[in-house]
């Protein structure tokens, strides 16, 4: 069976390396490229047509939101976009969804959730699971 091809787009090298290492443990996934800014993300998505683009929102040269819009214009509908961001505000989630993202995770998520989200959006589902504010519990 063909692996799910993934493009990683994050401006932090250590984050991309960590994501690549996590996804290397998944036998059904293959990282086919890495982008360090929004322009690279668009160019690589256009060239590689990956199954899933994992996109940070805070990117240099072109924001993640703008990159999502451009990727939706230049790639086939089969290319899905999963936002992985430190922003947990609902406005960002809604903007990403409106621009064509199929999923949204916050970087505070458990590591296993990334592979689950990639598989779900690859299958044509959506996966919007931003972190919810913790409720204070008294002892």
Image (cartoon, rainbow, N blue to C red):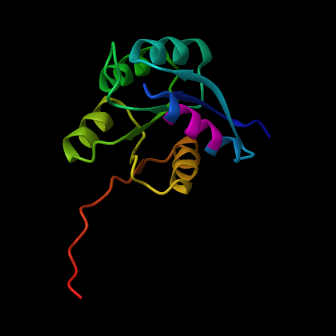
Q: Which of 108 and 64 is in front in this view?
A: 108
Residue at position x 20%, y 75% in the image: 136
- Decide if residue 81 is on the left or right side of residue 98: right
Image position of 23 with respect to 73: above or below: below
- Decide if residue 21 is on the left or right side of residue 53: right
Image position of 19 with respect to 125: above or below: above
Percent of width and height locating residue 45? 53, 18
Image position of 23 with respect to 17: above or below: below
- Decide if residue 91 is on the left or right side of residue 87: left
Residue at position x 35%, y 23% in the image: 59
Classified by dominant secondary structure, the portion drawn in magenta counts as: helix
Query: Which quadrant of the figure contains the N terminus?
Result: top right
Percent of width and height locating residue 114? 52, 48
Image position of 56 with respect to 39: above or below: below
Which span of residues is magenta-colored? 15-21
Q: Which of 137 and 56 is in front in this view?
A: 137
Asked whether residue 84 is drawn in magenta, I would say no
Number of marks in the image?
A: 0
Residue at position x 31%, y 35% in the image: 96
Asked whether residue 19 is drawn in magenta, I would say yes
Percent of width and height locating residue 133? 24, 62
Residue occupying the far right of the picture: 1
Percent of width and height locating residue 33? 61, 22
Query: Which quadrant of the figure contains the C terminus?
Result: bottom left
Q: Give residue 109's quadrant in the image.
A: bottom left
């Amino acid at each position: 069976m063909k692996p799910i091809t993934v493009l990683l787009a994050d401006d932090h090298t250590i984050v991309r390396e960590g994501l690549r290492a996590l996804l290397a443990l998944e036998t059904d996934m293959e990282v086919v490229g890495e982008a360090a800014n929004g322009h690279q993300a668009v160019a690589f998505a256009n060239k590689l047509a990956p199954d899933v683009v994992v996109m940070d929102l805070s990117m240099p040269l072109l924001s993640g939101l703008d990159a999502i819009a451009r990727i939706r214009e230049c790639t086939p509908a089969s290319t899905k976009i999963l936002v992985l961001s430190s922003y947990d505000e609902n406005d960002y989630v809604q903007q990403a969804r409106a621009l064509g993202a199929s999923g949204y995770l916050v970087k505070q998520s458990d590591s296993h959730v990334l592979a689950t989200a990639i598989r779900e959006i690859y299958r044509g589902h959506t996966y919007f699971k931003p972190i919810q504010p913790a409720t204070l519990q008294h002892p």
